[in-house]
Image (cartoon, rainbow, N blue to C red):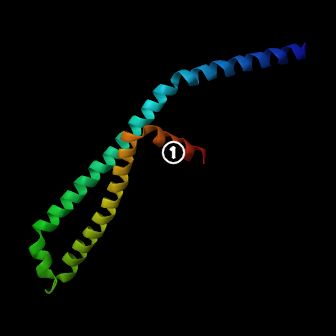
Amino acid sequence: MKEEQQQKLVEYLLGLMERGEDFVLEQAPDLVQQILAWEWALYCTGYCFGVVFVVSSCVFLFMNRKKIFESWDGDYAFPWAVLSGLLILITTFVSFGMLLCLSTFVQLWVAPKVFLLEYMSSLIK
C-alpha cells in the first residue's frame, strides 16, 4: 500500500516536471524579449540622465564662468573653485558611465544574442 502511494507520487512529480518543462519552453521567447526590452530601457534611462546631467553642468559652468574665474584670486575663492572642480570631476565620472551605457546599447542593437549569453553567464556565476 505504501509502495503504491510512493509510486503514484513519483508519477505525479514526473508529470509536473514534464508540464513545467513545456511551460518553460513555451515562455522562453517572451522571456528573452522582455529581458532585452528591460535592459534597453534601463540603459536608455541611465544614458538620458547622464546626458541631462552633463549638459546642465556644462551650462552651469558656462553661465557662472565669470564668477569662477574671478574667484581664483579673490577673497571668496574657496566655494566657487571647489564647486566647479567637484562638478567637473563628477561630470567626468558620469561621462564614463554614459560610455558604458552606450556600449551596452550598441551590443543590444547589433548583437542581442551575445548580450543574452553574457547575461545568462553572469546569472550562473
**Residue 41 location, x and y as percent?**
35, 40
Give the tally of numbered discs.
Answer: 1
4 vs 48, left or right, is right
Q: Residues within 10 Å of mark 1 (few under 14, many from 20)?
A: few
- Residue where numbered disc 1 is placed: 118
* Mark 1 secondary-structure assignment: helix
73 vs 109, left or right, is left
**Residue 84 location, x and y as percent?**
22, 72
User: 77 above or below 102?
Assistant: below
Quarter of the figure with the N terminus: top right
User: 120 above or below 7?
Assistant: below
Residue drawn at (12%, 72%), measured in percent from left and top?
A: 65
Residue type, numbered disc 1: Glu
Image quadrant in which you'd find residue 83: bottom left
Of all residues shown, which one is farthest toward the front? 110
Residue drawn at (57%, 21%), measured in percent from left and top?
A: 23
User: 89 above or below 40?
Assistant: below
User: 15 above or below 121?
Assistant: above
Q: Nearer the viewer, residue 19 or 12?
A: 19
Residue drawn at (42%, 40%), measured in percent from left and top?
A: 111
16 vs 38, left or right, is right
Image quadrant in which you'd find residue 97: bottom left
**Residue 123 location, x and y as percent?**
56, 44
Residue drawn at (19%, 58%), measured in percent from left and top?
A: 56
